[in-house]
Image (tube, helix red, strand yellow):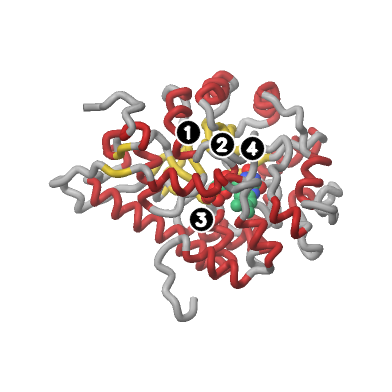
Amino acid sequence: MGEVTVTNVTEYQAIAKQKLPKMIYDYYASGAEDEWTLQENREAFARILFRPRILIDVSKIDMTANVLGFKLSMPIMIAPSAMQKMAHPDGEYATARAASAAGTIMTLSSWATSSVEEVASTGPGIRFFQLYVYKNRKVVEQLVRRAEKAGFKAIALTVDTPRLGRREADIKNRFVLPPNLTLKNFEGLDLGKMDQANDSGLASYVAGQIDRTLSWKDVKWLQTITTLPILVKGVITGEDARLAVENGAAGIIVSNHGARQLDYVPATISALEEVVQGAAGRLPVFLDGGVRRGTDVFKALALGAAGVFIGRPVVFSLAAAGEAGVSNVLKMLKDEFELTMALSGCSSLADITRNHVVTEAEKLGVMPSRL
Ligand code: FNR
């Protein structure tokens, strides 16, 4: 990787910024409107403090996690992020290989620049497929079947994007998928290219193709076209967590789409407990948004998450160093998480409890004291 040793996940962002054309870097980095939620996704983690326990044997740390019945090396997985070949020519192939080598799950975006079949061809690995529901349901049915056939193990249904959030950098840059690339899953369906627009080409694409009528009945419909478990990605309230349970979801991903959709929603780590309570133990709750440290992973698990996903660190490390970069991100997070467990007195995920952290709400006396 050259002269400077990368010692944490965040450092890849500056390297990516140097390497990538501005339009592409901005697409990866930006959030919606004022980017308040973007900042808050990080800051909210920083307001949660630890209550470590001492004098506990931590000579052996077991980080293995069970996600929908699959055994992973750690509770850290890869979120779907679109168009990874803009970051590096190996794109989604590199991400798939790095995830599989690390013993964890990659979620492939609907808008990947490699198809479900191409990603499957990289070799074995547990993979989820992220689904955007198009107005043309035949397209959706076909795509879900292809993902299933290619060996993907779950569908992450993104529910926070009836329209694209207002990402001002993309509007200024007139963001568009570079003409040498295609949204590979839609090649041959005449939906693989993105037209240049007067604002964000992606926002126009979404306005043209994505179904704004999407509702809970479609979550039921999806269950009639696939036997794969469905994770509802983009829940941030307890009410919707209850509805996800009622409508047959297999899991929930607490996500604000990396702060790229509705600005001024809370950080996901702040919304997590409410969602966990709404789910009432009836399905697993995962989280993404702002996870950059092993300490963040621990905090999410202490507040009830069954695992976390990372988004931007993947595209930034991919831009910096391809597959090796993504592998390094996964390794750094794993090592940091292991150290956090040891220093908190936890030798397995089951040892991590609500009492290992203290939140802002508790410090302010908003929540009843535990003691
Ligand atoms: C995303 N995200 C996303 N989500 C989704 O459901 N489908 C997609 O195609 C994409 N594409 C995408 C591209 C880029 C560049 C980013 C940064 C994000 C959202 C993603 O899955 C995840 O929710 C967030 O990225 C998590 O936040 P962090 O880790 O980026 O802070």
- Badge 3 vs badge 4, beta-carbon distance below 8 Å: no
C-alpha gap between disc 3 and disc 4: 21 Å
- The answer to whether the residue bearing label 4 lies less than 8 angstroms from the nearest atom of ligand 1 is yes
Q: Residue at x 75, y 60 (%)?
A: 173
Viewer-closest of 233 and 369? 369
- According to the picture, the residue beneath numbered tag 2 turns out to be 265
CA distance separating discs 2 and 3: 30 Å
Badge nearest the viewer, 3 or 4:
4
Q: Position of residue 55 (x, y in %)?
A: 13, 46
Upstream in sequence: badge 2 or badge 3: 3
Tags 1 and 4 touching, CB below 8 Å: no
Which structural element holds mark 2?
loop
Q: Amino acid at mark 4?
A: Thr
Q: Dividing the image into 4 quarters, which one contains the C terminus? A: top left
**Residue 187 placement (x, y as % from top left):** 80, 52
Q: CA distance from mark 1 to mark 3?
A: 27 Å
Say which amino acid is labelled 3.
Ala
- The reply, left or right, for residue 140 in relation to residue 88 is right
